[in-house]
Image: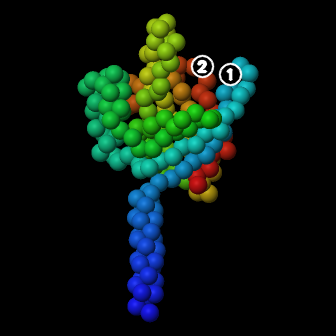
Amino acid sequence: MNEKKSHKLMRNGRACAIALALSLAAAGQAGAEQLTATLVNPEGRPSTLPVVIHIDRYSTVDEEQKLADILAKKGPDGLRDALWDLERGYIRIGSSLGYPIAVVLSKPSAAGRDIRIMMDRPVSFRELAHSARSLDYPFSYIELKLGKDGKGEGQMFAAANISLTAGIIDVENYNFLPLKLISVRAR
């Protein structure tokens, strides 16, 4: 009988350990948020791709100010270098691998909230080999407007240049029109 009790205690002990590990994992993800959307290219032949934006944590006001100071002192190249050290989540477009997101800001708005996302962008070998003008646009920038129900829309500047003019951050898009993000949903 003692053998059965000890076996039962070990089984319950394992169950408690598994439950503890799962609860710790869930607590680590408590700040995580996932957004889904459809990316639409309005230029030329329209095309769409599914998008997943996974946010592990939001950037703080202090982090935002530090990056603005880097932009003011070192310019876009210094900002791009600083973004390499940051990771707040990832974005996955279509069936591609996730690409790290460096900055994610969420601000309340009258309709719900606005989310701004910035990252250095992947540069293709072709751009490098041909010294393309797009190399002057080393960032990707996303603006999302979500309602209180967690649904909304936005736009993405796939290749952007970011500068500081009179204390205001300017985002310049390489393409004529930004990409559209429709059917955005927070999950």
Q: Residues within 10 Å of mark 1 (few under 14, many from 20)?
A: few
Identify the residue at image location x=67%, y=34%.
49
Residue 23 appears in the picture as rendered: no
Q: Nearer the viewer, residue 30 or 72?
A: 30
Q: Nearer the viewer, residue 131 or 167?
A: 131
For marks 2 and 1, the one nearer the N-term is 1
78 with respect to 99 (left or right) = left
Residue type of the residue flagged with mark 1: Glu
Q: Which residue is mark 1?
A: 43
SS of the residue at dot 1? loop
Residue 60 appears in the picture as rendered: yes
Residue type of the residue flagged with mark 2: Phe
178 with respect to 130 (left or right) = right
- Tell me residue 90's x, y (percent): 48, 41
Q: Which residue is mark 2?
A: 176
Q: Nearer the viewer, residue 75 or 123?
A: 123
Nearer the observer: mark 2 or 1; the answer is: 1
> Marks 1 and 2: in contact by CB < 8 Å?
yes
**Corner quadrant of residue 40:** top right
Where 129 sits versus 65, above or below?
above
Identify the residue at image location x=41%, y=25%.
162
- Tell me residue 56's x, y (percent): 44, 50
- Tell me residue 153's x, y (percent): 62, 42
Give me the C-alpha separation between circle 2 and circle 1.
8 Å
